[in-house]
Amino acid sequence: MSAELIEKIFKQANEMGVTEVIPSTMGEPLLFDHFEKIIGLCIHHGMTMNLTTNGTFPRLGAKAWGERIAPITSDVKISWNGASKETQEKIMIGSKWEKHLESLGQFIQVRDDHARNTGYYCRITLQITFLETNLHELSDIVRLAIDLGADRVKGHHVWTHSKELRPLSLRRSPESVSRWNKAVENVRQIAESHTRANGKPILLDNMYPLDPEQPEELIPDGECPFLGKEIWVSAAGRFNPCCAPDGQRLTLGEFGNLNDQSLASVWNGRAYLDLMKNYSAHPLCKTCNMKRKREEDECKLA
């Protein structure tokens, strides 16, 4: 995405009252040439950043990135897929377990130092893709997060948009759902009985039991966390409704391009408003693994 388009989007988003920016969950944002510019625009417009990174902290390293990121982020989600060298490196090809641990420790230390000096606290989340290959380490991942000083462990079930991914899904059979439900019970017990160094409990996100009779719909009556709440823009300027894989996302419709349209005109356009009204009946949305429990259901779980 060009620097000019980034500036245009920030200006229009600020005029619409947007207060938080999520710079890409479709790749590694810290590799982006204009990432430092995005940091500057967040500061200029008084916006916070919500960052997802693979945890390699390319180009500058964990300490230098932490010094730039911690002062402006509300939450930093770091990809994490195992509690052992074997599992982490098997799932996240090219990663180095020892380096991953070292970088996370450095980043948390920078965050803690900044919070102690300024009072501003950036939440750190370990973010998992729930897979057949890492289910056996889910409890240990939660323990690791507690020991390292992370605030939350969040995850999503793998979205099986290709046949190669189906054997990895924990929703593929009643037996796999049963094992998942047992793992959820275990991690909840750990979260309740082990506090972090600051005395606060670790937060668990998207770790709830599944219905063996409806494994394909994670939350049959769940709400979309994106429509009407988040603005997604591709590198080419295309307005997207969500983060579904591109081929599947295109089935939701065409909404406009911010190279030649204003953000407000697309947001308030008929195509987007129709999707917001009718998305629950769309085949893609029915199988979405990102839906959230409704607010009243979340309260019941608290």
Image (cartoon, helix red, strand yellow):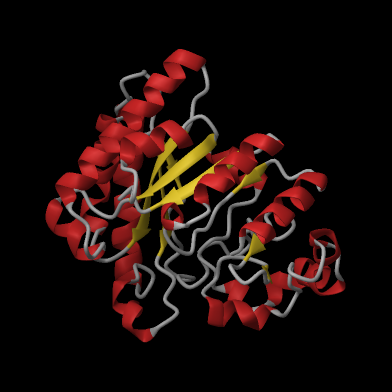
Give whichever of 105, 202 is nearer the camera.
105
Q: Residue furthest left?
A: 86
Q: Quadrant of the N terminus?
A: bottom right
Q: Where does residue 131 sit, x and y in percent of width and height?
A: 31, 64
Give whichever of 258, 77 is nearer the camera.
258
Is 121 on the left or on the right of 267, as rendered?
Answer: left
- Which of the 4 image quarters holds residue 236? bottom right
Question: Going 81% across and 75% down the picture, which residue do you hit?
Answer: 271
- Which of the 4 image quarters holds residue 106? top left
Give whichever of 209, 6 is nearer the camera.
6
Is 257 on the left or on the right of 22, as rendered?
Answer: right
Residue 229 appears in view: no
Is 33 on the left or on the right of 13, as rendered?
Answer: left
Is 19 on the left or on the right of 302, as rendered?
Answer: right
Question: Going 82% across and 63% down the picture, which residue do you hit?
Answer: 262
Where 89 falls versus 120 (above or below)?
below
Where 38 falls versus 133 (above or below)?
above
Give whichever of 167, 116 is nearer the camera.
116
Q: Where does residue 197 sit, x and y in percent of width and height?
A: 31, 20
